[in-house]
Image (cartoon, helix red, strand yellow):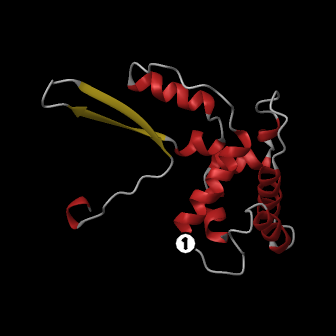
Amino acid sequence: MISVMQSLLSIPCINFYFYKKQYLTEQPDNNKKKPLHAAVHKFVKQLVDGSGSQTHEIKELASCFENKFNPYEQHDVQEFFLHISNLLQDEIKLDSALPKVIKDSESAYYFYMNSNRSIIDRAFAGQVSSTILCKACNEESVSYVPFIDLCLEITEATL
């Protein structure tokens, strides 16, 4: 848990976002409470200011995880990162209807980024485009899928 938080907070835009409470000024029309954002802010403030231990802040962070992550148990780092990322995204997410037709990759990405404005999306979001060609009728179907994490195989050839 600590290693994921330290890794996230080593990214300057994320650290600044939480330290300066920028989440409070984003989407002023969204009155939804943001308990995880507030808990991360306290954690960041403790780390940056160097004031005391982070034990209380870690417990407060863990209380936002719907009892899925006990800070005293061992967890998979990638699973924890995805969980905290999803919770942070959900606290900011806007309700927006999907357009009937998405013409191209750029408009698909633009739609996604406008309806998912969290700091996690700004820092990590990408998009995979896949094209399927029907051999019978030669019709092409293109889909655009956003992602936050991407698993890549690392082999000797890629090093």
Judge whether 145 appears above or below 10 on screen: above
Amino acid type indicated by mark 1? Asp
Residue under numbered circle 1 = 76
Image quarter where the N terminus lies is bottom right
Camera-side residue of 12 and 103: 103
The residue at 77%/50% (across/down) is 37
Q: Is residue 154 left or right of residue 47?
A: left
The residue at 25%/59% (across/down) is 158
Camera-side residue of 76 and 123: 76
Q: Is residue 63 left or right of residue 70?
A: right
In the picture as drawn, the residue positioned furthest to the left comes out as 136
Q: Is residue 9 left or right of residue 77?
A: right
The residue at 69%/51% (across/down) is 15
Q: Position of residue 11 (x, y in %)?
A: 60, 52
Q: Position of residue 16 (x, y in %)?
A: 72, 46
Crowding at mark 1 (Cα within 10 Å: few <14, some 14-19, many 20+): few
- Tag 1 secondary structure: loop
The residue at 51%/42% (across/down) is 125
Q: Position of residue 78 (x, y in %)?
A: 52, 64
Q: Position of residue 79 (x, y in %)?
A: 55, 65
